Image (cartoon, rainbow, N blue to C red):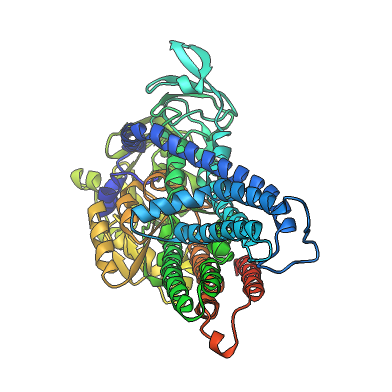
Amino acid sequence: MKHEHQDMRHKMPDMAHTHHDMSHDMQSMGHEHHDMNDNMQNMNHHQDMAHDSHMMHMGNMNRELVVSLILTIPLVILSPMMGMKLPFTVTGIPGQPWLVLLIGTILFFYGGQPFLQGALTELKAKKPAMMTLIALGITVAYVYSLYATVIQILQPSHMLMDFFWELATLIDIMLLGHIIEMRAIMQAGSAVSALAQLVPKQAHVQHHPGHFMDQPLTNVQLQDVILVKAYERVPVDGVIINGAPLLDESLLTGESAGVAKAVGMVVVGGSKNGATAFTMQATATAQAGFLAQVKQLVTRAQNEKTAIENLADRVAGWLFYAAVGIGVLTFVFWTMMQGFAVALPLAVTVFIIACPHALGLAIPLVVSRLMGLAAQQGLLIQNRTALEQVNHVQFVLMDKTGTLTDGVFTVQRVLVEQNQYQETDILRIAAALEQGSTHPIAAGIMAAVTSALPSVVDAKMLTGVGVTGIIEDTQYALVNYPYALEHDVVINEAHYQTLVAQGNTVSLLLADDEVIGLIALGDRVKPDAVKFIEELKQMQLMPVMLTGDNEHAAQRIAQLLGISDVHASLKPQDKITLVTQYQQQGAVLMLGDGVNDSPALAKADIGVAIGAGTEVAINAADVVLTNSNPSDVIKLLHLAKQAKRKMTQNLWWGAGYNIIALPLAAGILLPIGIRLDPMVGAAVMSLSTVVVALNALTLRIK
């Protein structure tokens, strides 16, 4: 996780080796996180209620589908399909018309209730769409069937075709489509519920100094001191106040390696502790921590609709107007030409055919497939609306540290300044001095040494400068460049400037106030980052680096990756400005992981967060890469493009045939003896539904 002082550190690389404990920065971020929690906490209750309402609505639709399917069975047995008796059609039962009418009425008002209510909402907003089209189809089918049944009862010799079969199957299919879509969306919510199970139900809270008592997690308050025992999970977000544990954060960040923590560093609820117990201070309650905020983000995503779904609504709106217009014209024209008896069935057929069964499954089946495939590939899609822009993306803007690089300092080069020393000597002495420090510079040097370290006597930390100590009667010091200048230490400026120009942070090792070696440390490029940039270029997408680091550091990484467009020394506002500038030329995908990336992620057409950047995942990202792998963006782009293509194809299969079917149903060829037989219309409807389902299943990761 990056910190706020990183910009200054990279503008003056030498100053980075100040040995100012990074935990202070992390703690500041923890407080920012806590402030954000406070701001969002008031929203929690309402959003949880909305989520519960969504679950309740889905439960209602499940019941409505079950009841509708039960009612459909006798209805299809007792009612002919568009006037045609099938082999299993039963006739001759006393009171059969009344029984069919009763079942159809219950089905219409109970099973069709969601669509009737939805249509009312759309019509009030003066935006007829999918619900209005469905409501038109089932209402016309029911009203005309009611009319046909009454006429049949009053005048048995005057047989009229009813549409109870179509009423039942249309309601069933549309309910099924909505349930499939809601279940696909709720998968993300289920993932959050699974994460919530990782947090213990109780926490060991300090009531008196040194005395801890178990209490329910819901009772944990801000600033409570909590004991986390060995191998337990961290109950809430907080800051370590005692101990130096090794935490497994893989389930939260995707990082499989253990993360070393120290006093003052942030810990996230759900992390698993290692063998070292520690105490922490809660910076968030269970209701406002990391997992709670993920739930809020998912809840918000559940209530959003993708642009292609809006296109589906627009298609439904066009069909609604077409059906109403053509249906009215059909009724008026044929009433004038051949009378009411001929005109009414033709108009009714137009209204019913305009709402094909396949339209209710066109989008939900693809959405369900998309969400499932994405989850398998480590892509948590939080805002499907943003993915509509995938075909317009021309620029992929990305942060450097933590996104393209590991965000971990490693030794890049060691220069020996006195012949009696070897590179290994320089590193061993420096590592011995750095023992016990939690600074990233110290961690990088320690990681570069595998042999035993010499003993250090009288080790001291020089605040803001470095460390000193005595090894075998020699006074050594590992310091930064300003310290050396201030104390008139002779430095090989050419060597030093060469290392700095390569984007490194440089520390100087002194022996009795003489420079004996230079240690250059820099960030390490992620293993798959080079391939990721190459694949972006192959897709005709332009990679752009945005970073708060200095120009030298940025250019070094950019050259390794093959990125030519680099913007360095940026503040968060600068990143927003650049995103806006690139958006004037084409859609922008922003990839980042840190708090400072959040505004740019929110501004971009598609914001993608590295899984380790928890604040970003909570606040700004449209998609989270749970494996923290930047190359997963390639999978995302391919999958989103395929999904959009499948949705468009399904809309054509589900509704496109109306271009031919509606005029035929209206009797345009009736003068030459050709009309759309209701059975043919029903067969085409069924065929399009099968095609839509099969087409959705072909969505896959290539």
> Is 681 left or right of 332, judged from the image as shown?
right
Q: Is residue 598 in sight in this rendering?
A: yes
**Looking at this view, is 476 or 508 the one in front?**
508
Q: In what quadrant of the picture does the C terminus appear?
A: bottom right
| Residue at figure coordinates x 51%, y 28% from the top left | 235
Q: Position of residue 116 (x, y in %)?
A: 48, 51
Q: Is residue 412 in sight in this rendering?
A: no
**Looking at this view, is 222 or 543 the one in front?**
222
| Residue at figure coordinates x 33%, y 54% from the top left | 125
| Residue at figure coordinates x 27%, y 58% from the top left | 575
Q: Position of residue 557 (x, y in %)?
A: 38, 63
Number of numbered callouts drawn: 0
Query: Residue 399 occupies which quadrant of the picture?
Result: bottom left
Q: Position of residue 325 (x, y in %)?
A: 41, 72
| Residue at figure coordinates x 74%, y 67% from the top left | 85
> Is 307 left or right of 679, judged from the image as shown?
left
> Is 481 left or right of 367, judged from the image as shown?
left
Q: In what quadrant of the picture does the N terminus appear?
A: top left
**Looking at this view, is 299 or 251 the one in front?**
299
Q: Position of residue 438 (x, y in %)?
A: 41, 37
**Outermost residue, right direction?**
87
